[in-house]
Image: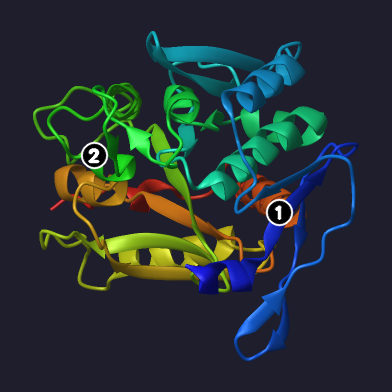
Amino acid sequence: AFSLLRNQGLFIKYDNDNSWSRVDFVPIDSNQYRITIAAKPKIQVSISIPYSSADVDKLATLVSGNKNINIRTLGVEPRTFKIFDFGKDDGKKPIHYFIAGEDLFETASMWTADAMIRYLTDNPDVLAEITAHHILRIVPAMSPYSLNKTNNYSFLDDDDNPIYGAATWGDDLPAGELKYMRNEVVGIFPPSTEPSYLNSKRLHWVLNMHSWWAQANYTNLQASNKTKSGVTLIDNENSSRQKWLEDFLISNIEGIPRKHYEISTTWRAGLPRDYFLAKYNFITSVIEVCTYKQGMPEFTATGQAIINNLKNKGNDYDWSKLYAPKE
């Protein structure tokens, strides 16, 4: 555990500061490290930058006056959460989902999603360009309920037991918040007896946002070509879908600090990318925002880069490869 902290540092907030800053550990010898903190009347120290239900509420207050943003509440009390909708749904525009906070120790990804929302709010030209042809739905924290209830950085199930929330998408009955989120995303698919061939193709980029702290020194954008259970990505003989997926990931890490991408087998069944690939042969992805020598400036830069990379794709970008090719 200390190796992660050594690579990351600690996050410090002083009594008169509005934000957290990262402070490095300095080696004294091969077995000892030192961290220096200024003497202040009040000092907060954390191994991650906390993200709370109060931060979601502040964010909602900040953007509530923008006519191009709609804030919805999903779920049933007390397990409700906010979705920030950008753009007007005319029943035809394609929809992107960016979902953070499936596991509550991964606050770097929540701050990244928060930064995406702030960036869209502060840059009307960027917002107008994207929403002219697309709808964005961003969830900065899947479970403010769990944020308020737990001290062990876990997602809670409906009985308040800690679980790995991100791996419950494939469950028959996932925890309440996950169930409502999954049903909404799947609901974009039109009713069909053959859900693999989703004719409307309104659902575009589904990006689940996680953070593996400082386990690696890069932020990784991942997608899967094989599920944990062995279901493989359907492609044609030229592997055009696989090639498109690699280009897609490369284009979407542009401008991200410590950027990296990967196509691999899903490491755990039940994750969204496993669930959607196995059930619909639909490609989703995940970004693991690292904390290795990174803090709020880098989380903000990552969020802004994700939005800019989406904007740069334009209205003529071919999203059809997300869907299984017709046999």
* Mark nearer the N terminus (2 vs 1): 1
Is residue 81 rendered to the left or right of residue 107? Answer: left
For disc 1, the marked residue is 11
Q: Residue 88's image quarter?
A: top right
How many other residues sit within 10 Å of disc 1, few (<14), some (14-19) or many (≥20)?
many
Q: Nearer the viewer, residue 315 or 96?
A: 96
Residue 125's spot in the image, x, y percent? Answer: 80, 33
From the viewer's perspective, is residue 190 above or below residue 13?
above
Amino acid type at image mark 2 = Thr
Give me the C-alpha separation between circle 2 and circle 1: 30 Å
From the viewer's perspective, is residue 315 above or below residue 76?
below
How many other residues sit within 10 Å of disc 2, few (<14), some (14-19) or many (≥20)?
many
**Could you tell me which residue is drawn at 15 percent across and 43 percent down?**
279
**Could you tell me which residue is drawn at 70 percent across and 49 percent down?**
45
Q: Nearer the viewer, residue 282 or 172?
A: 172
Residue occupying the far top of the picture: 77
Q: How many marks?
A: 2
Which numbered marker is on residue 168?
2
**Could you tell me which residue is drawn at 88 percent across and 41 percent down?**
41
Q: Residue 6's image quarter?
A: bottom right
Is residue 13 rendered to the left or right of residue 311? Answer: right
Residue 123's spot in the image, x, y percent? Answer: 81, 34
Residue 97's spot in the image, x, y percent? Answer: 47, 35
Q: Nearer the viewer, residue 26 or 225?
A: 26
Q: Is residue 316 visible?
A: no
Residue 318's spot in the image, x, y percent? Answer: 46, 50
Which numbered marker is on residue 319?
none
Q: Is residue 185 visible?
A: yes
Secondary structure under the numbered disc 1 in the rendered image: strand
